[in-house]
Image (tube, rainbow, N blue to C red):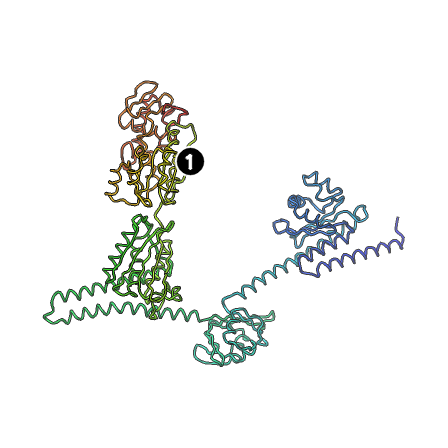
Amino acid sequence: MTDDPASLRERNKALQRRISDLSRAAVRVSTSLDSGSVLQEVVDSARALTSARCALITTVDEAGRPERFIGAGITEAEHGRLENWTDGPRLLQHLTRLPGALSFENVPEYLRRHGFAADMLPYGTARGTQIVCRGVRVGYLFIFDREGGGDFTRWDKEVLPLFASHAGAAIANARAFTDEQRARARLETLVSTSPVGIVVLDARTGGVVKINRQAERFAGALRGAGSRSLEQLLELVTCRRADGSETALKDFPLERQLRNGETVRAEEIELSVPDGRSVRTLINATPIHAPGGEVESVVVTMQDLAPFDEIERMRTEFLAIVSHELRTPLTSIQGSTGAVLSAEPGFTRPEMMQFFRIIDEQAARMGRLIRDLLDAGRIATGTLSVSPEPSDVAAMVDTARTSFASGGGRHRVVADLPADLPRVMADRERIVQILTNLCSNAARYSAESSAIRINARRDGLAVEISVSDRGRGISPEQLPLLFKKHAVDDGARGLSSGLGLAICKGLVEAHGGRIRAESGGEGRGARFTFTVPVAEEPAATPQVRPAGPRSTFQKERKSVTILIVDDEPEVLRYVCDVLRTAGYTTVSTGDHGKLSKLIRAEKPHLVLLDLMLPGTDGIELMERIPELADLPVVFISAYGRDETVAKALDAGAVDYIVKPFSPTELKARVRAALRGREPATFELDGLSIDYNRRRVTVVGRPVKLTATEYEVLRLLSVNAGRVSTYRSLLNQAWKQAPNKIDPKLVHAVVQTLRRKLGEDGSSAAWILNERGVGYRMPEPESGGRP
């Protein structure tokens, strides 16, 4: 059956309207390059073209991850819920696997059937399509529920992918525009903040198209306080080239060169104005060609040569400093050798030896100067290295005093160092060099009758060492310039003509310290202070012990309480951490006045007592506090002199530990001090060890062992539950040096020991093998140790 002409005309008109609507929609989405506006227009037009109740669009990145989500015909609350829908990305991944156009007759049911939240899209029917541009998926477009009810028409289903193809092109164009804008903004920022002056000129008119901040600074330096415009200023600028020729900027042959396609590379030009202002620059110019080949614009870069002039000035000044420093000892050496060579026959030997001493002293001075020059170079290139090791501050100060005096220093150097100063991690030779340089600097600006003082004190994890004088002092404005390498002596205290202070700064910083200068002003002396880290080892890392039953020995050791008395919080924390890791209970205090009360309350098994405490010392406390008489006391102190140790042991101490000490040494000495207080027997599944009588039995049967076999068994038992390595067994049972470790020797003794105990390696119950490491005994669940 054929349609009548009137009906065909109506259908044609309807089709023309729809095509016209589609064309207008395609034009609308392409009128803007703003991404947000394009997406909103796409979703609005899709809704209008299909008479949908609402429409949604989701864009994706190159990896298919959702980027933006925009809707039309939905409330703000609905939009917020959909935007924060955690299942949204997973739903998109699901949709990408579906072939062809997307069609859903019951959206909630479809979502529920595939494991998604059904209430997030409460619509009946839905149509969707991918948005693709040049083969790349850029998003998805969905329409939901036709206005007025009913299903979407065939035209609606056909027009959606057609419109999506137009939308894809518009979205791609908007993205490209956004990317271009971002790139342009980055380029603008780069040009604007460049330390090199950049000017873009129109090749036809010579006018300024673009000028950055640095080029504006050049113009400001030439303009001064005047109010000339940039164009007026360019009319007045004169260019002086490196060969001395001058020309007005407007007559400079730059334009001709650029019009011919030539470039200007690294030409040194001084720009000046009639009132005398000038700027020296290094100019580069590059033409930018239009598509037709003609020069369209010119990019001129200008680099300020003032910093290079300053570097050249500093280099010349440095050479002058070196020449001056070398000339002084060289003059003395030359004068002395001339006096000896032209000596009269009656020239005495003492007179000759005096000249030789002068030569020797000045040669040593030149050697020190050359060393300083080499150090200055290493500091500048970052290749200066130090080799720190635990060092005594007092010893380094004494060496520096001797070095200063032997180098010709006439000032008296007074050192005032506390007796309990800790050792520091330092390269001894370098610290002596720092102190000598600071003493020499102090002597240069102080009267010979004025003493130079060296003080030191602990400051947390560092030791502060200061060198002070009562000389000319330093003005406040000169303090920041003291440690600069190329300072010049202007007659005031602060600016030295040498390299000593700059080298001191480099050496101190190489140790991880800091150096500073202080002064009350001119005529009030100065103090230079630098820091060096304290040579204290970190607390031991807790060891992971093998799982298993606990031994009676370990149970007993964990009940051991140790009291630590020290007025330094860092030492207290360090010792407590080490002993807690080893399984002991610790009680600590920095107040010796609470010692009696703590002993009565805590009943410690051992006391670790600092020798030097505020207002008293440990030896006096042992004599004065009766509660200490019944306890083993171990002194910990920074003083390691033999007479001090002997005095402490005579007072009743069981041991004496010198700071700094390692965790291994501390634990070993504590074990030794407690050994006499440990229980006397060990029991493990029929194996019994009587430590006092050195008797071993197995189910009541005596076992006869050699001295070495017994010592190996004893060591394994007192360390039950932990592995005893070949090294530790050899060191303790054989007293053998670590570099002579021979596991075969330990294997042989253990094999014999097992045979005497009545067990073998394949079914060992008492001595277990830790392959490649050593041996261990298990920890019994209970035992006979009281």
If the image is split into quadrants, where does the C terminus sit? top left
Identify the image quadrant of residue 526. Answer: bottom left
Instruction: Give whichever of 120, 421 is nearer the camera.
Output: 421
Circle 1 crowding by C-alpha within 10 Å: few under 14, some 14–19, many from 20: few
Please provide percent x and percent y for residue 582.
38, 36
The residue sitting at 34% across, 55% down in the picture is: 385
What residue occupies the far left of the structure in this picture? 346
Q: Is residue 752 above or below residue 274?
A: above
Lateral position of residue 339 relative to residue 22, left or right: left
Instruction: Give whichever of 785, 548 is nearer the camera.
Output: 785
Please provide percent x and percent y for residue 614.
33, 45
Please provide percent x and percent y for residue 35.
66, 57
Q: Secondary structure at mark 1?
A: loop
Lateral position of residue 343 relative to residue 273, left or right: left
Lateral position of residue 761 relative to residue 82, left or right: left
Please provide percent x and percent y for residue 474.
36, 65
Q: Is residue 578 above or below residue 322?
A: above
Residue where numbered disc 1 is placed: 544
Amino acid found under the numbered disc labelled 1: Val
How many numbered marks are there?
1
The residue sitting at 20% across, 63% down in the picture is: 360
Lateral position of residue 100 relative to residue 531, left or right: right
